[in-house]
Amino acid sequence: MANIRDIRRRIRSVKNTRQITKAMKMVAAAKLRRAQERALAARPYSLMITSVLRSLISRGDLVDEKTGEPKHPLLAQRPEQNILLVLVTGDRGLAGAFNSNVLKAATKFLDFFKDKNISIAAVGRKGRDYMRRRYPVATPGAETRAGRVQIVGEHLNLLGKLQYEAVEEIVERVIHAYDNAEIDSVYVIFNEFKSVISQRLIAQRILPVQEIGRREVALAEEFSLEERERMGEAARGAGISLKEPPETEDERRAKEFPAPDVDYIYEQPAEEIFRGMLPRYVVLQLFQAMLESVAAENAARMTAMDSASNNANEVIDSLTLTMYRARQAAITKEIIEIVSGAAAL
Amino acid sequence: MADTLHLQIVTPDKLLVRDDADQVQIPGKSGYLGILPGHAPLITALMLGEISYSHAGATHYFAVAWGFAEVLPDKVTILADSAERAEDIDVKRAQEAKARAEEALRQAAPDLDYDAVQYALRRAEVRLEVAARAGHTAAAH
């Protein structure tokens, strides 16, 4: 039978661990809530940009009449040979399978396009580290590629305090490379997050723009039912809603923007407005992907920490039981010794 | 005809303003526009500059970077990459940005992205001007 003092010590240590995992769970839940709020706050802008672009496109003068080709280079399809992959992972671990899920999806993506040149821009430390172990880093300005798959950029600690301007800068560089035909298409791999129980891993193509207002998904992987249930349980425990937030009044109005049957005066040609606005749409796509990834990361961390706390509870219960048994055994032994000692007299 | 305008300023971060306004001034790409209730429907791109609107005697100022505005007889909607209330502008940061841009222009390194620096300079100046409207002690000039 184990020593009572040793068991007590172990119980104390597990209790300490439980305290940490509980605290991490609360922090992750708070961060998840904040990420959801931010994603929500970005929606009116995104909806308005989308509907303005749509209405500009429907005016029809953005397509070349002779060839039927779209006039804007960001809309034009080219044969895909050089692909830029933006990989969105977390900066930190302890988030269950979150990072490895995204990386698995990335591996699948690289397999799928195995005859293409792929340049990776890693957002988040975990993805950067993983890719660096496997693929070479491209030297800036080099004539030749470092490999079929190469790393062209890394953005660490961007997600913690995600700024729209930072995403804008990244996309500016991406569009520049796209205009110079250094890359033919741009995909983002990230954890799509609609709500805690509605998540997918997707590869979304953000360039060229195919259809405004629709997420163009190249590869997608649903979460298993079990994973979803586990996530839902943890969210309920932390008081986080499982449903997608309903459409607000602002969003409904944003969708009807601009008013459909109004004959506007255009201060600038529609084409010029369109040209200024389309890059913003691409920025928004990436910005939104990152916001969702942050929400998903924190949801995964919250779930993992909830499981860890539950495990700690179980370990404590079983250790406590063992301790009681050991103590009872010691008492019984003492009584037997006293009784047999008395009997000997 | 309505005698107030319904003004909305929307940025990627949030719905910044939703308010009634007696008149709105926006920095259209082809020049500043003053908008009163009953204006003809109009769509314009915005340039770097200052948005202001007055309501019930008080005037509010905003610094805006790239944007886009839709004007209807009773409504003005502005989409902007970034828009800041005059009161919220970080004057110190704007001054630093201005100093940095001016320094870069003075040194004129051969690989200088002249347009980008000019833009940064102009942007910092606009922010300082707008901040000064809010009564900040902007010792800019």
Image (cartoon, rainbow, N blue to C red):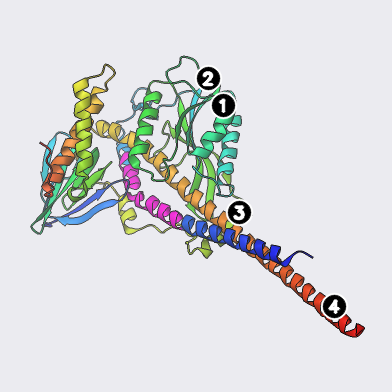
**Residue A167 inside the magenta-drawn segment:** no
Q: Which of marks 2 and 4 is in front?
A: 4
Q: Residues within 10 Å of mark 4 (few under 14, many from 20)?
A: few
| Same chain for the residues under marks 2 and 4 in the image | yes
Identify the mark nearer the N-term, 3 or 2: 2
Mark 3–mark 4 CB contact (< 8 Å): no
Q: How far apart are marks 3 and 1 (CA)?
A: 31 Å
Mark 2–mark 1 CB contact (< 8 Å): yes
Chain under label 4? A
Q: Distance between the residues labelled 1 and 4?
A: 70 Å
On the image, the x and y values in percent for residue A39 come to 39, 50
| Same chain for the residues under marks 2 and 1 in the image | yes
Mark 3–mark 2 CB contact (< 8 Å): no
Q: Can residue A176 be seen in this view?
A: yes
- Tell me which secondary structure the magenta stretch mostly adopts: helix
Q: Mark 1 points at which residue?
A: A135
Looking at the rendered structure, the secondary structure element under dot 1 is loop
Q: Which of marks 3 and 4 is in front?
A: 4
Q: Name the residue under label 3.
A: A227
| Same chain for the residues under marks 3 and 2 in the image | yes
Magenta segment: A30-53
